[in-house]
Amino acid sequence: MNDAVKTSSKRKINFSAFANVVVFFTLEVLAFIAFSLGTSYILYSILSIVLLAFLLLVTFRQINKDGLATYAFFLFPIFVFGLLSALSVFTQDPAFALNGYGFFIPIAMTCFAACGYFVSSIKAFSISKAMLVIYSALAVLTLINLLATMLEFTPFYTLIYRGRYIFYDGAISEVPISQMAFALLGFSISEVSLEYFSLFPSLLITAIIPLFFLKFKQNKTVFSLYLGYTILGFIALLTTVSKMTIISDVLLFILVLLVLLFSKLHWKGKVLKIVAIVFASLFAIGFIVMFFNSLENGGGIFKIVHDFIAGNSLLNRIFTANGLVDKYNKILNQLLTTDTNGNFIWLFGFTATEVSPSNSWFFDNFMTSGVFGFFFFIFFLFVGVRRLLKYYRESSDNMKDKAMVVAFILCFFAYSFINYDASPLIFSKFLMPIYLSGPFLIALFLLSYAIYQSSSTAKAAVLSEPIAPEAKPTANKEGADENETISL
Amino acid sequence: MKMKRFLCKSLLLVMVFGLTACGYSLNELYYGDSYNSPNFADNYYKVWDDDINYKGSKNKITNSNPETIVLDKATDYVFTKFGEDNFNLVEPRHDDYVYINDFTEEITGEDLYPYGPNNNLSDINDSFRYGYMSKLFDGQLFCDGDYEKARVQIDTSGFGRTFSKELYSSTYFAISFKTSIEYRRIVDVDGQDVEIDISKWWNGSNVGSLVHDCGINLTINFYLKNAHGYERVPVSYEIADIPSNGSEDPLTRANYILFGFEIGHSVPSLDRCAGISIEYTYTDAYLDNINAQITAKNESNATNAYFNSNESSRHLYGGPIQHSVLLYEVLFPTSIWH
């Protein structure tokens, strides 16, 4: 009998014993990507392939096939979006960050998203610790960027030195220093746009959310860390304050407030649906109006809308005369350019030499991935956000973690909707669309985690024992983080 | 109590951030239109860093009255044109270089390399990319239609700036420049901008020009760093017959001077050079002659019928005519900087 058992154990290697190691590796990769080393995308891709291979080895026996089929609805459009982005004319631009290596785009996005799904099935994986790792990496990056900027400039330089320029390489800088900052991009500190700099502290101030769920006396270290991160993010934004970052951070503040209100008051179901529908409708109407208005030579309904907007001073200010919307109009116009035969020539994307990036992922996707890439992006985002809200309503994760995951994803996409600089370097035409940014990959990872958790079959997958009692999914009640520690 | 301690620590952290506000990049800030005026007088770069301002009292120059080294054309291999014998002697790759082109790094298909873009200091060391002086290190040897944006314009008193790096080794030094007399001026007359064509004003018609040759005595001070400050090494050389105000010919670049000399002879070494100043004096009376006639010319133009249809150029407002050295590049080819 014993011999039979021994023979059996010799034949089959139980990779699930490595679950803890893979979870640790996942957290390391998460930290690395949240650190957002910019040009290291190829490295991310390779890491995500290796990580996914390990995760498949550890989880392939236990993972539920039904859940995978549902997840494919999310993963497939990501892959297609990545593929279309890689094949787009945009990647031929010499300034494109992955010049010549565009095929890493679908690999990194798909693999890293899948990692988020598979790692969720391992019990040793704790979303609390994952979020702490992500925010810690963001905090280190923000601290480096802030120190570099303050060494070169001074607090509030954006207000004190408005309209002042520096000379670089024999020419006056294109933008005043009030629109510049210093940040770690790639493996060197460079002059970057203020929009790019502000992305990280803006995401970091969402670390305020756990402070509403944790109790200082019971979770001193974790509470202090999140408080410190929030203060750091706030200081970074305050010392580099600008009109555009104020606008985007007000948007983030509203989102954080909504997330807090929903989670503290346990608003779910109907209220959530109503708010989602109101936001989606406002956005859809705005986009349709802008799309109609952007077509300069359109006739019929396009002309009617165009004339109506031109005749109304308020709408004219928003959709025509305003510089912000003007950038979106240029992208849409370029997309719909036709040749002499009336064929659309830029439907699969175009380079940034024709039109500058618009500082919005929503419109930049037309340029970077073409119209079909845009629709696949919207599709996976729609599926992802829908499952994210389901995760928020139904998951057994504690409310703090759910609120953090939701807030991080929504805040990243909201901020990047109006303020993502795809050309972050001041003195170089370096192009880094949203799909190359670290926080985007983190958002994909978290969306995949949420999809797994929201799946009704998620509970079926049981792997190794948790490495610490606090890693076990806890009951959905407030104050459940009392035993939270930072040990891994 | 512990919370209070935590807040105190946070406050301390904030103060640390305050202390880190060194503002290294705030030393050189400019308004968007700085040194970009059509008027010569507004474009003069006259900045002297205190440490090397030998005419000032706060300098850190350790040798107070050094003897000026007057370069010898033969023994110091002084050149004033690209392709001269002396240039070919000091620049071993002279056959690989072309002079007239400064737009690209390489002439495709010809295995030839434009001299400026392949010897510029900003490519040798990144520290030369920053600041107004970066105009002199960017590899652009000629105006190329960029006018004020391309040049550093100096009057006879010149400028003096330190570098953030020290020269470790170099075989020769060179500068690219041309000279020009002011050819137009925009002045405010009774609240209105008036554009004066100096050539028309001077000639009393649209016949004639301001084309002339001028001579200068160039003085370049190199500041070599030492334990207590800087050792000043003044070097001078007289250049005659510099063509001024001729039309730009991109095929000959005849208006430009590429002046240089080999290090290691009269100037034994420029190691640890961490600053430079450039000044000059005119060796001819061309400018003084024009300026002495401003009043007389204004009076004669007052009754000149030509100006009835060119009224704006009838009278010269705004003081003496300017004559400048327009610097385009400072070169230490194949140098090493620490």
Image (cartoon, coloured by chain):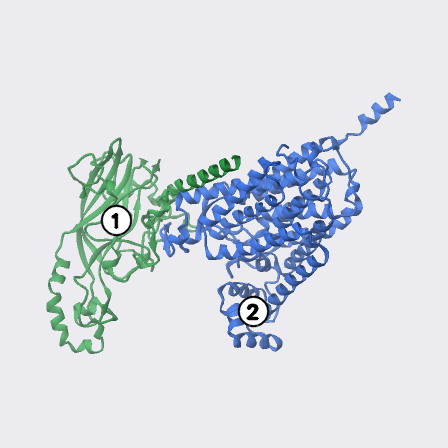
Chain colours: A blue, B green
> Could you say where residue B231 lies in the image, as x and y percent from the top left?
22, 35
Whether residue A338 is visible, yes or no, is no
Residue B200: percent from left, percent from top: 20, 70
* Badge 2 amino acid: Ser
Count residues near mark 1 (Cα–Cα under 10 Å), then give few for <14, some for 14-19, many for 20+. Answer: few
Residue drawn at x 58%, y 64% is: A335
Q: Is residue A267 above or below residue A12?
A: below
Residue B7 appears left or right of A176: right
Query: Against B171, is B211 above or below?
Result: below
- Give A459 or B243, whichever is nearer the viewer: A459
Residue A196 seen from this side: yes
Q: Position of residue A25 (x, y in %)?
A: 64, 35
The answer to whether the residues at label 2 and label 1 have Cβ atoms under 8 Å apart is no
Quarter of the figure that contains the N terminus of chain A: top right
Residue B125 or A468: which is nearer the viewer?
A468
Report which residue position mark 2 lands on: A294
Choose between B115 and A343: the one closer to the eye: A343
- Chain of the residue where label 2 is placed in the rendered structure: A
The residue carrying mark 1 is: B47
Residue B328, percent across and down?
30, 51
- Residues marked 2 and 1, same chain: no
Element marked by disc 1: loop
**Which residue lies at the image location 32% right of the left edge and 51% below the top edge?**
B141
Identify the amino acid type marked 1: Val
Q: Nearer the viewer, residue A277 or B323?
A: A277
Q: Secondary structure at mark 2?
A: helix
**Quadrant where the C terminus of chain A lies?**
top right
